Amino acid sequence: MDKHGYVYIMASGPMGTLYIGSTSDLVGRVFEHKNKIYPNSFTAKYNCNLLVYYEQFDSMESMVARERQLKEWQRNWKMRLIIKQNPNWDDLYPIVLKSFGYDSNV
């Protein structure tokens, strides 16, 4: 079954400012954040250009429910979620690009 949506967390750096979003086009949306396509956006203003966490969903309803849930979480819960999956706060975008068949130098 095709995946329909993603919930993701962008960060300004390890333990830095966090942004939670959702999209049906993870590659394109993260590209927009990284390149500050919307210069007045939260991610551009706070330099949240590292993809540090993402989840994939089979339905838009599940995606939206998870995004709302994470946005209600306390900051320390969000930090633990990231650290559990990505303890070094690596930028996961190159991994995402590769998994979608793109050259990671894009």
Image: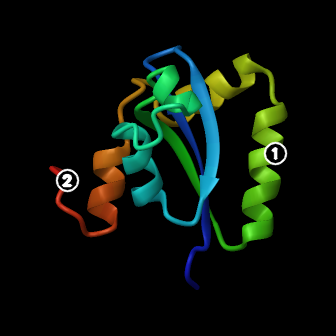
Figure label count: 2
Q: Which residue is mark 1?
A: 68
Is residue 34 rendered to the left or right of residue 76?
left
Most foreground residue, 33 or 50: 33
Which x, y percent locates residue 7?
63, 51
Helix, strand or loop status at disc 1: helix
Q: Quadrant of residue 13?
A: top left
What kind of residue is marked 2?
Answer: Val
Q: For residue 78, what is the image quadrant?
A: top right
Whole-percent x and y of residue 6? 59, 58
Q: Residue at x 26, y 69 (%)?
A: 101
Pick the front one: 66 or 82 = 66
Badge 1: residue crowd in 10 Å (few <14, some 14–19, many ≥20): some
Of residues 54 and 71, the one drawn nearer to the viewer in this rendering: 71
On screen, residue 76 above or below 105? above
Query: As displayed, is residue 19 above or below residue 45?
Result: below
Q: Which quadrant of the structure image shows residue 9?
A: top right
Q: Position of residue 46 (x, y in %)?
A: 51, 20
Q: Residue at x 47, y 41 (%)?
A: 38
Query: On the rendered structure, is 20 left or right of 31?
Result: right
Quick one: label 1 or label 2, which is nearer the N terminus? 1
Residue type indicated by callout 1: Arg
**Residue that carries the numbered disc 2 in the rendered image:** 106
Q: Residue at x 15, y 50 (%)?
A: 105
What's the CA distance linking mark 1 and mark 2?
31 Å
Q: Residue at x 58, y 85 (%)?
A: 1
